[in-house]
Image (tube, rainbow, N blue to C red):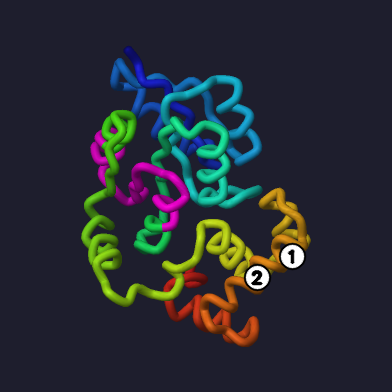
């Protein structure tokens, strides 16, 4: 039986590249593609894929937030994050949100293919370039403070650092500005930041907001 895949990436050329790579395997079938989170949510309802290969950088909603939304709608859905971010912080948050695997876009093509099969089979998997760093982070008795954030808090912080206000973040994440404001407060409380300037400094020191 074939594994039915949904590809989510806002770059059509990138999607075409890994569509061709994956469809070389006779048992992998791309049933839909999406360039935004909104289209991805609709595609999951319409096509019921077995597995979603999902970029974290989407124009309308962060990929980590989308992972959580997809898992809420279908707890059995398997998700593989495929991202340019090599910071273990992003991998940890993607896994916390519900992804089973995380592969960086700098990985060899064979790594992506193998990860698709492993995640489809219910296995956790990480690309070799990030697995040792993530393992050390998780074993660290005092991991960085950003690891204490929930996936929602992480996405809100990332958007705050991008310069979005509460209204814009609420629009992008499909939550109320009041919820964003409360989340903003919780982030500062968890990180011990007394101001937004201090919050931005702490986030940058610990790897977020450096591109």
Q: Which residues are magenta?
A: 93-114
Cα gap from disc 2 to disc 1, whole angstroms: 9 Å
Q: Position of residue 157 (x, y in %)?
A: 58, 67
Q: Position of residue 134 (x, y in %)?
A: 29, 61
Residue 107, relative to residue 7: is it above or below? Answer: below
Q: Is residue 45 magenta?
A: no
Q: Earlier in the sequence, mark 2 or mark 1?
A: 1
Residue 42, relative to residue 199: is it above or below? Answer: above
Going 48% across and 34% down the picture, which residue do you hit? 75
Q: Is residue 77 left or right of residue 160?
A: left
Quadrant location of the N terminus in the rendered image: top left
At mark 1, the secondary structure is helix
Local packing at callout 2 (Cα closer than 10 Å; few below 14, some 14-19, many 20+) is some
Kindly give the residue lying farthest to the top in the view shown: 1
Q: Is residue 94 magenta?
A: yes
Going 21% across and 60% down the picture, which residue do you hit? 132
Local packing at callout 1 (Cα closer than 10 Å; few below 14, some 14-19, many 20+) is many
Residue 105, relative to residue 23: is it above or below? Answer: below
At mark 2, the secondary structure is helix
Q: Circle 2 sits on which residue?
A: 184
- Identify which residue, 15 or 3, lies in the foreground: 3
Q: Is residue 6 left or right of residue 171?
A: left
Quadrant location of residue 89?
bottom left
Which label is found at residue 166? 1
- Identify which residue, 20 or 60, lies in the foreground: 60
Q: Position of residue 103 (x, y in %)?
A: 33, 47
Residue 142, relative to residue 164: is it above or below? Answer: below
Going 33% across and 29% down the picture, which residue do you hit? 120
Assess whether mark 1 and mark 2 are in contact (beta carbons under 8 angstroms): yes
- Identify which residue, 56 or 139, lies in the foreground: 139
């Amino acid at each position: 039986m074939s594994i039915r895949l949904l590809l989510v990436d806002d770059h059509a050329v990138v999607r075409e590249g890994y569509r061709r790579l994956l469809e070389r395997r006779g048992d992998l079938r791309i049933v839909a593609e999406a360039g935004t989170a909104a289209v991805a949510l609709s595609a999951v309802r319409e096509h019921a894929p077995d597995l979603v290969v999902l970029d974290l950088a989407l124009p309308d909603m962060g990929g980590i937030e989308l992972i959580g939304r997809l898992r809420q709608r279908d707890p059995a859905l398997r998700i593989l994050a495929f991202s340019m971010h090599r910071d273990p912080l992003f991998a940890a948050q993607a896994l916390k949100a519900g992804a089973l695997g995380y592969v960086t876009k700098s990985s060899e093509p064979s790594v992506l293919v193998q990860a698709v099969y492993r995640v489809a089979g219910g296995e956790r998997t990480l690309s070799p370039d990030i697995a040792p760093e993530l393992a050390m982070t998780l074993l660290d008795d005092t991991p960085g403070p950003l690891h204490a954030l929930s996936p929602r808090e992480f996405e809100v912080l990332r958007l705050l650092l991008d310069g979005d206000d509460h209204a814009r973040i609420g629009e992008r994440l499909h939550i109320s500005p009041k919820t964003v404001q409360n989340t903003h407060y919780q982030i500062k409380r968890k990180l011990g930041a007394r101001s937004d300037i201090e919050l931005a400094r702490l986030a940058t020191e610990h790897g977020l907001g450096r591109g």
